[in-house]
């Protein structure tokens, strides 16, 4: 029995809370730049969120994906498709995040170069939000009695 009285493993419950906390970091990072509080703070918050997300992927999500029996035994079911779409979206978000934070890390003081990537940043944040909601939906499908 998990934290939320579901059939979810405790690690899945904790990861769900962890992902919501990561998204709060992203929102704060977005607000920092929107309120013109500094691109360094914005980059640091986004980098921290990315590191937390990477840890979550490596420690919880990848092992969970690889052990998801329904993915390989029943690949055409709704849960399997949701997991696949969630994994693809999450991978794209992670790749974009690593690229954005990586380029920022090596060019911290070139604000104009960073500002040119604004549309990619916005798309990444929107994809991250979609991925978060997909993850919550996967959690509901797998662990809540519906």
Image: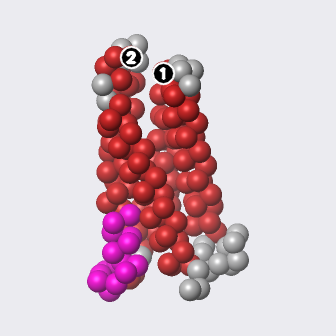
Left or right placement of residue 95 versus residue 33 in this view? left
Q: Quadrant of the C terminus?
A: bottom right
For residue 39, which numbered disc appears in the image? 1
| Magenta stretch secondary structure, dominant | helix
Is 76 in front, or is 54?
76
* Element type at mark 2: helix
Queried whether the magenta region covers residue 89, the answer comes back as no
Q: Tags 2 and 1 in contact by the CB under 8 Å rule?
A: yes
Identified at 58% across, 53% down, the residue is: 20
Give the quarter of the image for residue 3. bottom right
Callout 1 crowding tier (Cα within 10 Å): few <14, some 14–19, many ≥20: many
In this rendering, position of residue 67 left or right of residue 45:
left
Q: Position of residue 122 (x, y in %)?
A: 38, 39
Question: Magenta part of the protein: which range?
Answer: 71-86
Residue 70 lies, with reference to residue 2, above or below; the image says: below
How far from the left and from the top, in percent, is residue 139? 52, 71
**Residue at the location (69% across, 72% down)?**
4
Q: Does the stretch in magenta take in 80? A: yes
Q: Say above or below: 136 vs 31.
A: below
Tell me the residue that label 2 is attached to: 111
Does residue 11 appear in the picture of this structure? no
Q: Secondary structure at mark 1?
A: helix
Depicted 142 relative to depicted 24: above or below: below
Vertical position of residue 145 compared to residue 49: above or below: below
Residue 65 appears at what percent x and percent y? 40, 68
């Amino acid at each position: 029995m998990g934290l939320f009285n579901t059939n979810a493993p405790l690690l899945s419950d904790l990861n769900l809370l962890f992902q919501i906390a990561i998204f709060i970091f992203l929102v704060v990072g977005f607000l920092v730049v929107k309120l013109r509080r500094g691109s360094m703070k914005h980059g640091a918050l986004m980098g921290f969120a990315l590191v937390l997300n990477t840890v979550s992927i490596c420690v919880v999500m990848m092992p969970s994906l690889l052990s998801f029996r329904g993915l390989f035994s029943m690949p055409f079911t709704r849960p399997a498709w949701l997991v696949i779409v969630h994994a693809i979206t999450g991978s794209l978000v992670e790749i974009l995040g690593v690229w954005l934070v990586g380029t920022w890390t090596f060019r911290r003081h070139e604000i104009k170069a960073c500002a040119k990537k604004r549309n990619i940043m916005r798309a990444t944040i929107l994809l991250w939000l979609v991925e978060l909601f997909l993850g919550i939906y996967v959690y509901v499908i797998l662990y809540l009695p519906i």
